């Protein structure tokens, strides 16, 4: 089909050919930008529907839609530059350079990114919810951080510890990645009260108190 188009173009006047050399790339660029906008719009709607279905917080929705927007616009920019005559070798070199920098930044910020990913898992898988009482344990036998879940953000899960020393409640911020590396106990209501070890033995039985009189 391309040879036929070339033959058709060669039969046109020179001034028409000059205009075609300008109009055709311009139309291609407009189509690329339009396709990028439509794809971004559709993916944004898909993310919003998924957010409404799984009840994802807005603070997680904003960076996700931003990442999608930048990926689509970056791809569209590369296609536009190619249509403008930029060498594919130059584009590939630039892409690999940015990819290398991105990989280095990814490994440098691995701890932060792992917490972000675990926050997404917590908000979708729902091992616990805000309002639940949980205990994060090193092992199933040893006591760990315990409290009521009051907030789940992109980096931390915040627990309200009512049993802190001196009777004053305190807040515990646990990295989200740590939640998936530990055993988690969960209570939907108020957790059961466990008596301190030896409390029953130290307390004087009521029968013995009356027997001494």
Image: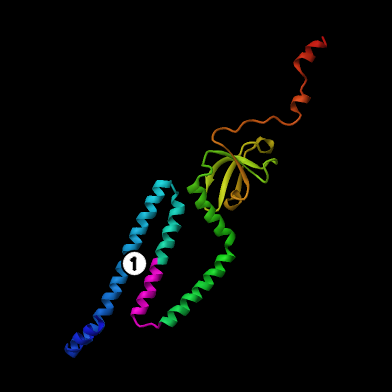
| Element assignment for label 1 | helix
Residue 37 in the figure: left or right of residue 163: left
Residue at the spot x=38%, y=68% of the render?
A: 73
Q: Name above or below for residue 164 compared with residue 45.
A: above
Q: Where is mark 1, residue-wise?
A: 36
Q: Residue furthest top?
A: 213
Report the predominant secondary structure element of the magenta stretch: helix
Confirm whether the magenta stretch covers residue 13: no
Residue 107 visible (yes or no) = yes
- 86 shown above or below 76: below
User: Is residue 81 located in the magenta-colored stretch of the structure?
Assistant: yes
Expressed as whole percent of the image width and height from the top left, the position of residue 17 reads 21, 87
Tell whether 49 sits left or right of 202: left
Residue 49 lies left or right of residue 15; in this view the side is right
Magenta residue span = 72-87
In the image, taking residue 137 as reference, residue 112 lies left or right, namely left
Q: Compare residues 63 and 52 and report the one nearer the observer.
A: 52
Q: Residue furthest bottom?
A: 14
Question: For residue 84, what is the image quadrant?
Answer: bottom left
Q: Residue at x 21, y 84 (%)?
A: 4
Quadrant where the image shows the N terminus: bottom left
């Amino acid at each position: 089909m391309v040879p036929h188009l070339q033959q058709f173009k060669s039969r046109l006047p020179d001034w028409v050919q000059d205009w075609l050399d300008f109009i055709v790339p311009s139309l291609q660029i407009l189509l690329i930008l339009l396709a990028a906008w439509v794809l971004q719009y559709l993916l944004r709607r898909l993310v919003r529907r998924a957010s409404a279905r799984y009840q994802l917080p807005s603070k997680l929705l904003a960076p996700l839609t931003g990442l999608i927007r930048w990926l689509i616009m970056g791809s569209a920019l590369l296609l536009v530059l190619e249509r403008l005559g930029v060498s594919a070798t130059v584009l590939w070199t630039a892409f690999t350079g940015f990819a290398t920098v991105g990989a280095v930044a990814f490994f440098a910020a691995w701890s932060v990114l792992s917490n972000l990913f675990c926050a997404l898992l917590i908000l979708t898988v729902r091992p616990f919810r805000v309002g639940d009482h949980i205990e994060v344990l090193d092992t199933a036998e040893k006591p760990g951080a315990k409290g009521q879940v009051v907030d789940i953000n992109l980096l931390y899960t915040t627990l309200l510890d009512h049993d802190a020393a001196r009777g004053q409640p305190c807040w515990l911020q646990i990295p989200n990645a740590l939640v998936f590396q530990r055993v988690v106990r969960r209570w939907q209501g108020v957790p059961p009260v466990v008596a301190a070890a030896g409390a029953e033995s130290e307390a004087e039985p009521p029968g013995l108190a009356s027997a001494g009189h």
